[in-house]
Amino acid sequence: GVDEKPFVRPIYAGNALETVKFVGSGPVVVTVRATAFGSEGLETGAGEAATVEALGEEEKGAMAGGPSEWVGEEKTESERPLLDAARIVISGGRALKSEENFKMLEGLADQLGGALGASRAAVDAGMCPNDMQVGQTGKVVAPELYIAIGISGAVQHLAGMKDSKTIVAINKDPEAPIFKIADYGLVGDLFSIVPELSSKLEELGYKKE
């Protein structure tokens, strides 16, 4: 049973693993990040299908009298893919300096068919909305390609994207922590590199919108 087995969970933004054991009574709730595992190896029909049962009138009646109720849902409409489900994510940081400069990443994201993300510093500076924040206090993503532009690589940000398959970092500081986990790094002025990257992509057939 659950009470007989220890659990291993990440702590300190994923920099350490802690082994814990359930010793109390009552139900145990275990949560798993959607990015904690990939879909490789999953085959249709490989396992037994789960049984899905419709709620009876008695169960529905019990739920209706509960302390919570459905009020509504508000979604931000965008032609770009959702940040936490995109194959490609382009994120900007403090080095972009302003909301106007941050918009230069939109063209790159549209060329690659990716989503836009941001560091906490960029969000706090008012460059972009809070729902674009990637990190321990934002969204956790693990895309096939993550491009970090002007992001130094604070621990809380790395916790939200370090499981990305391929990480590309663009930063003028060669000692920036982001380069320690990046697969590819470009040291230089992002205001020169991003337009050049966009131009090269256009030559390869990735047209600007």
Image (cartoon, grey):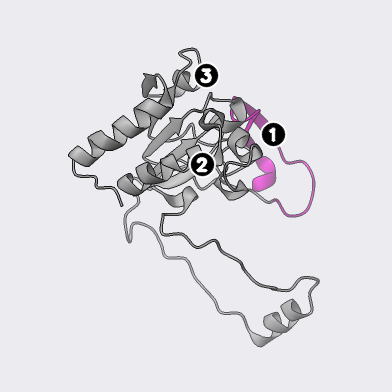
**Left or right: where 208 falls relative to 27:** left
Magenta residue span: 1-28
Q: Residue furthest front?
A: 100
Amino acid residing under circle 2: Glu
Circle nearer the N terminus (1, 3): 1
Amino acid residing under circle 1: Val
Q: Give the x, y percent position of residue 1.
A: 64, 48
Q: Give the x, y percent position of residue 127.
A: 58, 41
Which residue is denoted by mark 2 in the rendering? 100
Which residue is denoted by mark 1 in the rendering? 20
Task: For marks 2 and 3, give the one nearer the viewer.
Answer: 2
Q: Is residue 199 visible?
A: yes
Q: Is residue 16 visible?
A: no
Q: Is 99 one of the magenta-colored residues?
A: no
Q: Give the x, y percent position of residue 199.
A: 26, 36
Rounded to the nearest whole Å, what is the CA distance between mark 1 and mark 3?
30 Å
Amino acid residing under circle 3: Pro
Q: Secondary structure at mark 3?
A: loop
Q: Residue at x 23, y 41 (%)?
A: 202
Contact between labelled residues 2 and 1, with CB atoms less than 8 Å apart: no
